[in-house]
Image: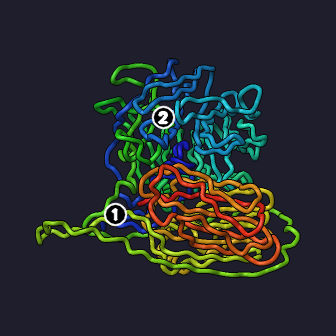
């Protein structure tokens, strides 16, 4: 599964910039006949699909090519790659023209999966994980696009006593941890957590749970936003479990998504590859390859991603003018993001059992424009007559609660709330010099300029912190929720206003900071958002609202750092990914005397406040107040009245619509 730019990667598909981040409800103007509230109501393509690219054949003959995964190149999407396995001898990397750019030949390789932006002690890396005599972890270079083994064992693989072949990754929306599921043909499944515990830039794995599905399994995929784990029991159907490591895995804790035709379902055995197409508001698709015994009967089955995974349609990848199709397909993957001129709406990849055209050869992988298989929100464009449709909002999962000791000196309680509202009306477009014919009515496109709408801040010493959304919030606005605490109490996901996705968190010393994002729905205006903690904590909770931001993933890039003790603190520098972005800066620190921070020049302060007493948290939120015109942003220094400690500083880049 392959999430796009920052997080959300095998078969993980999303419209927008920031993959690993949950995408929530938003009102869009669509043609009256269109709706994006349920995936099944989006206009689906009709008929079967044709590929436009095929990869070089694998070196081994027979049943060799197996499972692909897509790596998205954020700097140049057209330079993205497909990583695939040759079960009989190698792990291979292909460019989007299908040419092999790397082959690691070392015997049997099982399934492969990808996640971007994994944090190690030497910096973030994009992980390519495969089964090779255990769990084997590679880093992919953003410049060369080549793989290098970073598994922290003497053998180069993490030993798994259950055996394996099937494999998929999961990044938890609860705490951001990364896990790998491995499964053997006997139906045994194991879930390992991937970490860099010794901060050496190499990856270890720790077993968190294991169980038996039943009979033969291989294909699997995990939903990084909704927290589900799907696995194919080949002769039975597709099972759905909670992906969290502490969740039950007994037979009464799972759901049968679909079963074989003989049992009344849609799957012509075997049930094989699985992938997820992420769309806004928790919608999208679960896709499965139905590996029938005949090429003619082979199909890709499409289900809704949300709710009970209702059946959407059945589609084949057939022989076309440029390549043959995918027959008896094993592994599949998909990514719904602009990947350059050949795949402007995203890409679907499938393994082909019999490579016959344009020239016959060993097995390979076929690359298909994604919109040929499923209807995408990105395909829906405004017309001159529009209807506003609001996406449903997902239920937010609450983090597990740890027992945390409150720091001494936290007996003072005070609460202050500050609300700032500034509504900016974007400038209107100048009228054309020549008026259109009187029979033509045209709705001008909205401006993409970002503006600050409003914000609110609350400071308290409590186990639950609340802040009220500005009444000026409209559907489509971006919401950033920023929390800074003076101890390491466990932080639960926000409630009251649902649909948040965590951008990132930072813990150091005896302080924690967390930033969430979401796209507003109309009902969010004036609501109270609540963040609960596992112990009484002094904290600053702020929300800032901007308009004209991306309707799918407002946060385009970010960085955060724990600053050393002192009176001045500098924000981290972030590369600006595109024109028209705004930047939000967040400074937090802990001391016993400061009442506010002195801002740097050139920013617009949106919040600047603290509590009272010892071990207080002082925090300031500011934004650029205009589009960022430089290639990077950060290095902004704020200062306090006294030496502070446990300082956290953030830079968040907002993408324009």
- Residue 235, image x and y in percent? 57, 39
Crowd band around label 1 with a 10 angstrom C-alpha radius: few (<14), some (14–19), many (20+): some
Q: Is 465 on the left-hand or right-hand side of 59?
A: right
Q: Residue at x 39, y 69 (%)?
A: 389
Q: Earlier in the sequence, mark 2 or mark 1?
A: 1
**In the displayed structure, would residue 25 be above or below residue 128?**
below
Q: Is residue 192 visible?
A: no
- Residue 478, image x and y in percent? 50, 66
Q: Residue at x 45, y 74 (%)?
A: 474
Q: Is residue 466 visible?
A: yes
Q: Is 265 on the left-hand or right-hand side of 248?
A: left
Name which quarter of the figure residue 112 lies in. Answer: top right
Q: Which residue is mark 2?
A: 81
Quarter of the picture holding the C terminus: bottom left
Q: Which residue is mark 1?
A: 34
Callout 1 secondary element: loop
**In the displayed structure, would residue 375 be above or below residue 525?**
above
- Residue 584, image x and y in percent? 55, 62
Name which quarter of the figure residue 132 lies in. Answer: top right
Callout 2 secondary element: strand
Crowd band around label 2 with a 10 angstrom C-alpha radius: few (<14), some (14–19), many (20+): many
Q: Residue at x 40, y 30 (%)?
A: 97
- Residue 167, image x and y in percent? 62, 38
Residue 254's disc number: none
> Disc 2 versus disc 1: distance between alpha carbons?
33 Å
**In the displayed structure, would residue 578 be above or below residue 151?**
below
Residue lying at the far right in this picture: please name it.
408
Quarter of the picture holding the N terminus: top right
């Amino acid at each position: 599964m392959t999430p796009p730019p920052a997080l959300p990667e095998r078969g993980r598909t999303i419209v927008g910039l920031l993959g690993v981040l949950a995408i929530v409800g938003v009102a869009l103007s669509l043609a009256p006949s269109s709706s994006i509230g349920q995936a099944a109501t989006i206009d689906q393509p009709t008929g079967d699909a044709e590929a436009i690219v095929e990869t070089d054949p694998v070196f081994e003959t027979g049943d060799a090519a197996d499972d692909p995964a897509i790596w998205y190149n954020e700097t140049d999407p057209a330079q993205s790659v497909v990583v695939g396995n040759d079960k009989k001898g190698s792990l291979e990397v292909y460019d989007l023209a299908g040419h092999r750019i790397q082959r690691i030949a070392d015997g049997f390789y099982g399934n492969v999966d990808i996640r971007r932006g994994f944090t190690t002690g030497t910096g973030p890396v994009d992980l390519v994980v495969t089964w090779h005599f255990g769990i084997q972890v590679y880093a992919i270079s953003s410049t060369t696009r080549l793989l290098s083994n970073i598994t922290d064992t003497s053998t180069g693989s993490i030993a798994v006593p259950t055996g394996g072949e099937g494999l998929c990754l999961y990044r938890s929306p609860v705490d951001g941890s990364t896990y790998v599921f491995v499964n053997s043909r006997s139906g045994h499944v194991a879930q390992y957590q991937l970490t860099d515990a010794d901060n050496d830039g190499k990856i270890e794995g720790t077993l968190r749970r294991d169980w038996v599905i039943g009979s033969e399994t291989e294909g699997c995929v995990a939903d990084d936003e909704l927290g589900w784990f799907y696995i194919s029991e080949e002769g039975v159907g597709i099972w759905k479990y909670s992906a969290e490591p502490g969740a039950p895995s007994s037979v009464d804790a799972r759901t049968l998504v679909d079963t074989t035709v003989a049992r009344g379902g849609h799957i012509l055995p075997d049930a094989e590859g699985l992938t997820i197409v992420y769309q806004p508001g928790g919608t999208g698709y679960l896709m499965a390859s139905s590996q029938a015994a005949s090429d003619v009967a082979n199909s890709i089955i499409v289900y809704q991603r949300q709710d009970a995974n209702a059946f959407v349609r059945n589609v084949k990848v057939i022989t076309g003018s440029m390549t043959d199709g995918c027959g008896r397909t094993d592994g599949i993957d998909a990514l719904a993001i602009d990947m350059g001129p050949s795949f402007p709406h995203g890409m679907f990849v499938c393994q082909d059992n019999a490579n016959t055209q344009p020239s016959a050869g060993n097995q390979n992988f076929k690359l298909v424009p994604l919109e040929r298989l499923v209807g995408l929100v990105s395909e829906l464009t405004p017309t001159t007559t529009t209807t506003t449709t609001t996406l449903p909002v997902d239920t937010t999962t609450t983090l597990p609660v740890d027992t945390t000791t409150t720091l001494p000196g936290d007996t003072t309680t005070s609460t202050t709330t500050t609300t700032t509202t500034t509504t900016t009306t974007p400038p209107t477009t100048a009228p054309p010099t020549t008026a259109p014919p009187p029979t033509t009515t045209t709705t001008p496109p909205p401006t993409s300029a970002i503006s600050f709408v409003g914000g609110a801040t609350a400071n308290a010493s409590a186990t639950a912190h609340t802040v009220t959304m500005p009444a000026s919030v409209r559907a489509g606005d971006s919401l950033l929720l920023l929390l800074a605490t003076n101890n390491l109490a466990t932080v639960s996901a926000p409630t009251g206003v649902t649909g948040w996705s965590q951008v990132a968190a930072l813990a150091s010393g005896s302080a924690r900071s967390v930033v969430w994002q979401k796209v507003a729905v109309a009902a969010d205006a004036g609501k109270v958002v609540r963040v609960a903690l596992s112990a009484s904590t002094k904290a600053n909770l702020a929300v800032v609202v901007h308009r004209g931001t991306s309707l799918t993933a407002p946060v385009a890039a970010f960085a955060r750092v724990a600053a050393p003790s002192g009176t001045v603190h500098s924000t981290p520098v972030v590369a600006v990914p595109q024109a028209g972005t705004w930047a939000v800066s967040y400074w937090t620190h802990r001391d016993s005397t400061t009442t506010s921070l002195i801002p740097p020049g050139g920013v617009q302060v949106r919040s600047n406040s603290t509590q009272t007493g010892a071990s207080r948290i002082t925090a300031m939120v500011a934004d650029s107040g205009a589009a960022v015109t430089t290639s990077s942003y950060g290095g902004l220094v704020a200062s306090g009245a006294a030496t502070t400690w446990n300082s956290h500083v953030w830079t968040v880049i907002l993408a324009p619509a």
